[in-house]
Amino acid sequence: VSAVYFKGKWTNPFDPQLSRPADFHCQDGSIKNISMMTQTQEMDYFEDEDKQAVRLSYGKGHFSMLILLPRPTVPLENLTSNLTMQQWSVMDALMSQVKVKLILPRFKLEYKAELRPTLTSLGMPSAFSGQADFSAMAAVALKISNVIHKACLEVNEQGSEAAAATAVVMKRAIPVPEKQITMKVDRPFLVAILDNESKLPIFLGAVYDPENE
């Protein structure tokens, strides 16, 4: 079993008194009235023709959360299917401090998947069969019966809690105006918790329904 656990408090917490119910437009076309947090401050911000992106820091700034919100006419799948580490790096380099009014839903998500079919299709079917060779690990014949992955993420006014366990395309950046930007996350979006030193995501997920646990 390998596991990762993260719990972080926002550097600048959301004021619970500013949280209000608002509509969230889910992937299936339904509309849910959920609690939305609001915060206005200087944030790292980026936008282009396809998306808006904002970065929120945790604690002393060693970690951060990146929110990617596709434009209303862009399906979230278009972002997730074409996203590469090079695009992450380019977007990070082009972010700038802008005054942003961020409206973000509180959400708690859970995901579980059996990875045997995925790992088999990726090229390791023998590990799940009688032909498996784990002789370097044990004197008896062994094979893998299944691999189960589960992850969860909770985001609220104070911060985030996440856990997970396992049993370049470049586009023209739109110049960001100096006036206040409003980013209302009221439709499916991408969320990542980043290690700011390595710039690598330690948690990555797509939120289609904030209340779908």
Image (cartoon, rainbow, N blue to C red):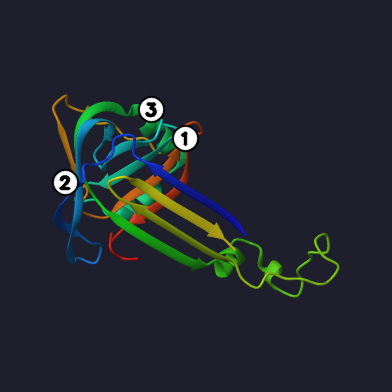
6 left or right of 50?
A: right
Q: Nearer the viewer, residue 197 or 5?
A: 5
| Circle on res. 126 | none
Q: Residues within 10 Å of mark 2 (few under 14, many from 20)?
A: few
Q: What's the amino acid at mark 1?
A: Lys
Q: Residues within 10 Å of mark 1 (few under 14, many from 20)?
A: some
Badge 2 is on which residue?
Answer: 17
**CB within 8 Å, label 1 to label 2:** no
The C terminus: image quadrant: bottom left
The N terminus: image quadrant: bottom right
Q: Height in image: 26 above or below 169?
A: below
Closer to the observer: label 3 or label 1? 1
Secondary structure type for disc 1: loop
| Circle on res. 93 | 3
Residue 96 sits in quarter: top left
N-terminal-most mark, 1 or 2: 2
